[in-house]
Image (cartoon, helix red, strand yellow):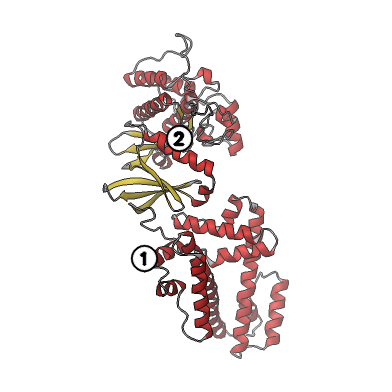
Amino acid sequence: MSSYSDLMFGQIAVKLGLTTEERLRECVGLQEERQALGTPVGLGELFVERGFLEAAQVEQVLGVQRRSAVAEEDKVYGEIAVKNGFLGREQVAASLEAQKQQKFAIRIGQLLLDRGHLSLQQHNAILKAQERVMDQRQTQFLVNFSRRYFGEVATEQQYVRVDDVEAGLARQKAQKDSGTTVRRLGEVLVEDGRMNDAQVEAVLDIASGKVPKNLIPGFRITELLGKGAMGVVFKAVQERLRRPVALKILLPSLAEDKDFIRRFIREAQTTARFNHPNIVQVYDVGQHQKYYYIAMEFIVGTSCAERLKAGEVLPEEEAVGIALQVARALEVAEKHGIVHRDVKPDNILLASDGVAKLCDLGLSRQSRKSEQGQSITLTQQGMALGTPAYMSPEQAQGIVEVDTRSDIYSLGASLYHMVTGLVPYHDSQSAIELVSRHLTDPPPDPLRVRPELKRDLAYLVTTMMAKNPADRYPGAASLIEDLEKLQRGQVLRPIGKTGPKRKVSRRR
């Protein structure tokens, strides 16, 4: 459930006219959704993410919220001081006015102490009572919200109908009016036979931000592995086969986009065709209620990115071996007409047995035509999808018809990172400058960072990262050939200089 602080943030934003009740409800719903999937996020951050508020407006709301919190707490402080006979109402009113004039730069308790109106013992007694009152107010606020929200979650999960919730709320009101103990909404719905205990527990888990272990039937979730803009990935156990899997679950809000869902399912179906040691295997794809998911091979090990984040520079031989294995994965994708579009260290998993596996074809694009003759696209056309630090120039330009050479560029950027410990153009001051340099600057030479590296490795990296796709390796097969030569210590021949260029493989 959203915190008291977040809900007050939303209410203040509405009162200031910066947003609407509808947008507030939407963001609160998204926040609960993220919490249910184990990826909590602040309400202000969500307002910015959805484009409902700018960062400066969030700071404005937070400033008002801080001042409002001080004003409310100090008002309670004054009420307690008067109630206990420590001060008169006129003294409290004058102190609150003085505090307001100072723009709440000093708390009322300190002000009264400084003026000699209170002793330290009286001040501490008031603070203890103030803490109890504020806790009670916040708890009551959250309880009232929780009653309403419990019904919303139970309805969303299809455990009850709206009229069931209304009947339960009516019973709660009758209990309150009669002076009897008001039972929790979940308890009322169980007593009326509208829900069972397991369903109530599941709703409470979601409302409290816990991850239900049985969110997807047939899979028992054990831990969170990662999260992104589209969803989250959990480690889970596929109970029927008793095997560990990586369970990728889309955010329910994305399910409203039917075109996106079709691309999501097609991604899984496409990836499931690959049975290759260097590609993460897809086991299952499906839907349960509002959740779409993909169950994938769980890799025991780490990612290339995790090793690089630890400040590690990979040994030259190991980096070349990883790049070779990824190139073999790209060769399989190329044969199926697939462009990955987001090759990067995060998507290169390193199994404990030393095998590198390419994962996350979530940005892949299938270039073949559908039966109706229309292009089957797994990404939205015209979008510059990918990760800026490793994005090819043609992707940065938003070019739709990219081919395997775009993935080769991204793999080259990843290889540069592996052997230097730095991303290409690492001294860029912004993401915009970084993308611009991928478009215009010469390929970065790894020898400038580590002169001890082999010159042939530097040649291979700069060829992979050539600005013009025609100057790169024409396909995964020719890249594999040179990577294998590099492993054997053979001299590489410049592409297009000592031998004819090979045609680029493009599947339609």
Q: Position of residue 366 (x, y in %)?
A: 48, 30
Look at discs 2 and 1 and give the one toward the viewer.
1
Number of residue marks:
2
The residue drawn where x is 48% and y is 10% is 497
Q: Earlier in the sequence, mark 2 or mark 1?
A: 1
Specify few, some or many for label 2: CA neighbours under 10 Å numbering under 14, 14-19, or 20 or more: many
Query: Residue 273's quadrant in the figure?
Result: top left
Compared with 477, 116 (above or below) is below
Quadrant for residue 121, please give it.
Answer: bottom right
Residue at position x 62%, y 84% in the image: 79
Q: Is residue 360 something that shows in the picture?
A: no
**Mark 2 and mark 1: Cα distance apart in space:** 42 Å
Q: Which residue is mark 2?
A: 344
Query: Residue 209 versus residue 197: which sits nearer the camera?
Result: 197
Check disc 2 and give the amino acid type. Lys
* Residue 415, horizontal then vertical, whole percent: 43, 29
Q: Is residue 94 left or right of residue 427?
A: right
Quarter location, residue 208? bottom left
Amino acid of disc 1: Ala
List x then y, in percent, for residue 507: 47, 22
For the point 42% across and 69% down, which residue is it?
194
Q: Which residue is under mark 1?
A: 198
Residue in the picture at 48% in, 69% down:
164
Helix, strand, or loop for circle 2?
loop
- Element under label 1? helix
